[in-house]
Amino acid sequence: MPTTAPTHNGPKDTEAQPLIEARHLVRKFGGVRAVDGMSITLRRGEMAGLIGPNGAGKTTLFNLLAGSLKPSSGSIRIAGQEVAQEGPERRIARGVGRTFQIPRPFAEMTVLENVLTGGQGQAGEHIWKNFLQPGRVAAQERAAVEKARSLLDFVRLSGLESEPARVLSGGQRKLLELARILMADPEAILLDEPAAGVNPSLLELIIDRVLELNAQGKSILLIEHNMEMVARLCGRVVVMAAGKYLTEGAPDVVARDPAVIEAYLGGVAA
Ligand SMILES: Nc1ncnc2c1ncn2[C@@H]1O[C@H](COP(=O)(O)OP(=O)(O)OP(=O)(O)O)[C@@H](O)[C@H]1O
């Protein structure tokens, strides 16, 4: 009996589609075009770098990708869906998490409580559910605490879970922030300068944890000025200058590219 092969719109098409695809993004602040027609993609499972001189627009681009800023024009697709006009909470729900160059934890809350703030859509957030289904809420809260503890273990901060976050060093704050965003199970993680201001021993731990997350299948886009770190972590780097896409390629090739060197020298001179 002839059989018809099942048609899959699914796995293959989905795998080929970039997880994040931004096209012709523009973001103006008054007369300044901080992002000026930038396009970038992040493929599923890859770890890519985003580099460029100071003021190139990298952080503004992250803010656009994370939904905390809306573009003046251009498109952002996540898993094929147009999301440019959505805010940061929808972006997290769509699986995009981001860290900041200078993390600002809730200083007086404990390390564990800070991680718990990264949870999404727990029943306890809705008073009526709390009233109607208290058992379910308690179970979800227990599960959230368990998950937060395992994430603190992942970033090696378990021993500090009851301390207020203010006691943490700069590098430990970066690890705490990583644990916090992992509470929402992001598929893509935007890391803004994870190495900046971190002492060498914690830096190795951060690199190791980021590599592990990528090995677990998370797609990662990394802003970093430390080229040695970029070369260790990323197969592909995208270079941005004056708000625009300049070039991309393997880190060692890009670092030797005269146009890239020129952009950095221009940045220093400016
Ligand atoms: N909220 C804002 N209002 C006005 N101008 C801004 C704002 N945010 C960024 N800019 C400007 O946009 C440009 C790009 O800044 P952005 O911080 O995105 O660059 P960057 O590549 O992340 O720089 P760095 O490597 O120094 O962090 C700069 O000229 C900056 O002064």
Image (tube, rainbow, N blue to C red):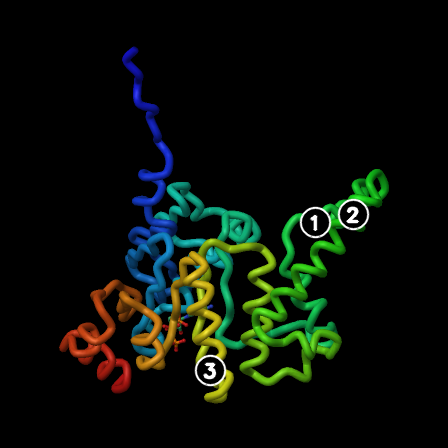
The spot of residue 227 in percent (x, y) is 31, 80
Amino acid type at image mark 1: Gln
Question: How far apart, in angstroms, are the residues tagged by discs 3 and 2?
Answer: 38 Å
Residue under pointer 2? 137
Residue occupying the point 59% across, 76% down: 156
Quick one: 265 or 11, which is closer to the camera? 11
The spot of residue 163 in percent (x, y) is 73, 79
Residue under pointer 3? 203
Residue occupying the point 51% across, 55% down: 186
Q: Residue 221: tell me if it is visible.
A: yes
Residue under pointer 1? 122
Quick one: 267 or 39, which is closer to the camera? 39
Q: CB of mark 1 within 8 Å of CB of mark 2? A: yes
The spot of residue 219 in percent (x, y) is 40, 58
The spot of residue 63 in percent (x, y) is 46, 62
Q: CB of mark 3 within 8 Å of CB of mark 1? A: no
Amino acid type at image mark 2: Val
Give the number of the mark in front: 3 or 1: 3
Q: Earlier in the sequence, mark 1 or mark 2?
A: 1
* Position of 32 relative to 43 (above/below): below
Q: Secondary structure at mark 2?
A: helix
Amino acid type at image mark 3: Leu
Q: Classify residue 25 by image quadrant.
A: bottom left
Q: CB of mark 3 within 8 Å of CB of mark 2? A: no
Callout 1 crowding tier (Cα within 10 Å): few <14, some 14–19, many ≥20: few
Question: How far apart, in angstroms, are the residues tagged by discs 3 and 1?
Answer: 33 Å
